[in-house]
Structures are given as structure tokens and as C-alpha cells.
Image (cartoon, rainbow, N blue to C red):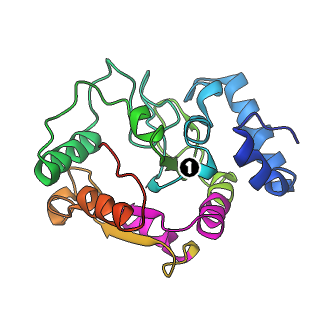
Amino acid sequence: MIVKIEPSWYKALRKTFEQKFFTDLITFVKDEYASGKVFPPGKEIFNAFDHCPLTTVKVVVLGQDPYHGPGQAHGLSFSVKAGVPFPPSLLNIFKEIETDLGKSLPSNGDLTRWADQGVFLLNATLTVKAHEAGSHQKKGWEEFTDEVIRTISNDRENVVFLLWGAYAQKKSVLIDSKKHLVLKAPHPSPLSSYRGFFGCKHFSKTNEYLIANGKKPIEW
């Protein structure tokens, strides 16, 4: 089936788009958008892919679900558009960057600036019903995004995978740790950030690895 997604991703995932689970998923998602409020807006579902082609991926940040409040989700994990208050986990990410790299908190939480540098901001589930966290889990998105992670692991080299929290860390079985760097820490949520997310120094470690492998560091 034809999926509106960045060409390098389309080429790599074309066989996945033709599988029954994916066609069933798209039918479900279309019905959900037609019958109620779903986030992110339809044209932004594949925003992470469109801003970060497979050929440019240097870092993967894995989230679980899109934000389910109005105006928050726009297809990039942890990110919110300019003008939207920082959700707690995103604020803690910025606090760790401040401690790790000495960078002050940014004026907005739009992480498109990261995506355009090769940071692939992937949620395991790409859509959610308004005000219903987890409402689109186990409908096929996870099967799709697992294939995306495998594709990055197989097709790219020396990528940094940032796995925060138990859910993200389960995805490590999809990643070849001999050719990539996998960094794990507790989730940046206020419930767990003090158990080791703060002080993990993932942002400086990422840049050190990228530089060591001849790649341009990320301007976090």
C-alpha cells in the first residue's frame, strides 16, 4: 500500500506496509480519526520519519505513547510544539542536559531541531485517542515500530540508542549492540527520574561516541 512517508523509509519498509497487520492497523487508525479526537494530527503521524530519513539517523530516542492532551503530540517522542508548556518528562530531559552539558533550558519544547540533526524521536505507538493514554496500544503499531528499530540496527552503523525506562529497554533485543551503542537509564518521568536518569550523562556520552566514530555531534 502507498504510505505517505519519507522516501528512504518507504523503500526500507515497503514490505512491512504490505503485511496484513499493517493494513489492518491503517483501517483501525482511519476509523478512529473519523469517529473521534485522535493525536497527533493525521499529517504528523510520521513526522519523526519525515524529519529524520533513515540515511541520516545517528541517535534513536524511544518513547512509548504520544501525548494525549490537546495541542501536545506532533509525531516526535517527548516533543511538544512551541508555546506548549513542557510536560514533566521533557522538563527533566532538559534539566539533565543542563547538568550534563551546561546548556540552559530552551525557550520551547519543539525537538524538531534535534530530528533535523539525525535524532530519530520514535514512539512505540504512533497514535492515541484524546485523553486516553495507551488507547492505541496492541493494535499493530508496536509490530511496525519494532520493525523500524530492526531496520535501523541492520542498515545503519554506530547509532546511539537511548533507552529510558523498562518499556524502552525491552527493545534492546532488536538492536545489534556490537555495531551500535545502547545506553539505558530510568525514565525521565518525575516518578523515576531520581533513580538514575538524573546524572546518566547520556547526552555527553552520545556526542563522545559520535565524534569517536567520525560523526558530527548533536547540538542538544
| Residue that protrudes farthest toward the top in the picture | 83
Query: Magenta stretch: dominant SS?
Result: helix
Asked whether residue 155 is drawn in magenta, I would say yes
- For residue 198, side relative to residue 29 (left or right): left
Q: How many discs appear?
A: 1
Asked whether residue 81 is drawn in magenta, I would say no
Residue 177 pos. (x, y %): 48, 78
Q: Amino acid at mark 1?
A: Thr
Identify the residue at image location x=59%, y=62%. 149
Between 20 and 153, the one nearer to me in the picture: 153
Quadrant of the image occupied by residue 77: top left
Q: Is residue 165 visible?
A: no
Q: Quadrant of the N terminus?
A: top right
- For residue 171, side relative to residue 86 (left or right): right
Quadrant of the image occupied by residue 201: bottom left
Q: Is residue 15 above or below residue 157?
A: above
Q: Is residue 3 above or below residue 157?
A: above
Residue 16 pos. (x, y %): 80, 56
Q: Is residue 30 above or below residue 161?
A: above
Residue 198 pos. (x, y %): 16, 58
Q: Is residue 167 visible?
A: yes
Between 160 and 195, the one nearer to me in the picture: 160
Residue stretch in magenta: 146-173
Instruction: Describe the element under mark 1 as helix, strand or loop.
Output: helix
Q: Residues within 10 Å of mark 1 (few under 14, many from 20)?
A: some
- For residue 205, side relative to residue 135 (left or right): left
Identify the residue at image location x=58%, y=73%. 174
- For residue 29, side relative to residue 19 (left or right): left
Residue 186 pos. (x, y %): 27, 64
Identify the residue at image location x=44%, y=63%. 161
Q: Which residue is mark 1?
A: 56
